[in-house]
Image (spheres, helix red, strand yellow):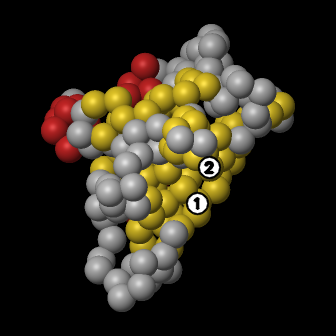
Amino acid sequence: MMLRMFFYLFLLTAIPFKTVLAQDKKENGKSKKEGHDDEEEPYCLEVSGTLYNDKKTLNKLDIVIYCDGKVDDNYNTAQENVFKAGFKKNKLYTLVIKKTGMLPLVIIVSTQMPPVKKEKFHRFFFETEMKPIKNNFNPEYTDYPAAYIRYIPSETAFNISQNYNTFIKTALKSQKE
């Protein structure tokens, strides 16, 4: 119970989200990403991925990105089998991926990074399975984000937080027993 309250508080108070590489807009003959000003801080991370169900690639995914508790971007992948989302430095985002008939996939993306002499644009790609709503899952399992992507200084790259994965698997296993 305390663990669940912790996650609710975390999600309600600390989840700022932001994304970008979504819909292109034409402006003065130039392609401009929606919600992006040239004056704003540049993107530091592109997260992309492919989702599957029963070994079949899914398309027509609804992508919603939150930053500071507000929708920052949303789009549909249409016929594309890969989604892409861009994130600015030193922000906390929530990436929600939805597909009709499937449980939503929630991913926390932290772009907090130490100062560096030369800025680098990072890319992170992943593949995962989406589960149908009709499965008999404990509803508590869907309360937790599926993954936490963050900058790992020792790798000088973005990766899945192994600490979070270990923590969440242990918490879910203890609830099961």
Q: Position of residue 81 (x, y in %)?
A: 76, 36
Name the quarter where the C terminus is drawn. Answer: top left
- Does residue 106 show up? no
Q: Position of residue 136 (x, y in %)?
A: 57, 15
Tag 2's secondary structure?
Answer: strand
Tag 1's secondary structure?
Answer: strand
- Does residue 54 show up? yes
Q: Position of residue 21 (x, y in %)?
A: 54, 45
Compared to residue 18, the image places residue 118 above or below, namely below
User: Which residue occupies the extreme right position in the image?
Assistant: 56
In front: 145, or 22? 22
Indicate which disc, 2 or 1, sits on the residue closer to the N terminus.
Answer: 2
Image disc number at residue 124? 1
Residue at left 42%, top 85%?
Answer: 118
Work out how far the residue at label 2 is from the one at label 1, CA to CA, in angstroms: 6 Å
Instruction: Say whether residue 103 is left or right of residue 169.
Output: right
Residue at left 39%, top 55%?
Answer: 38
Q: Are marks 2 and 1 in contact (CB under 8 Å)?
A: yes
In front: 138, or 91? 91
Q: Position of residue 92 (x, y in %)?
A: 31, 50
Amino acid type, mark 1: Phe
The crowding category of the residue bearing disc 2, from other C-alpha atoms within 10 Å (few below 14, some 14 to 19, many at least 20), is some
Instruction: Say whether residue 81 is left or right of residue 135.
Output: right
Residue at left 43%, top 53%?
Answer: 87
Amino acid type, mark 2: Ser
Q: Which of the 4 quarters of the picture holds residue 6?
A: top left
Residue that mark 2 sits on: 48
The crowding category of the residue bearing disc 1, from other C-alpha atoms within 10 Å (few below 14, some 14 to 19, many at least 20), is some
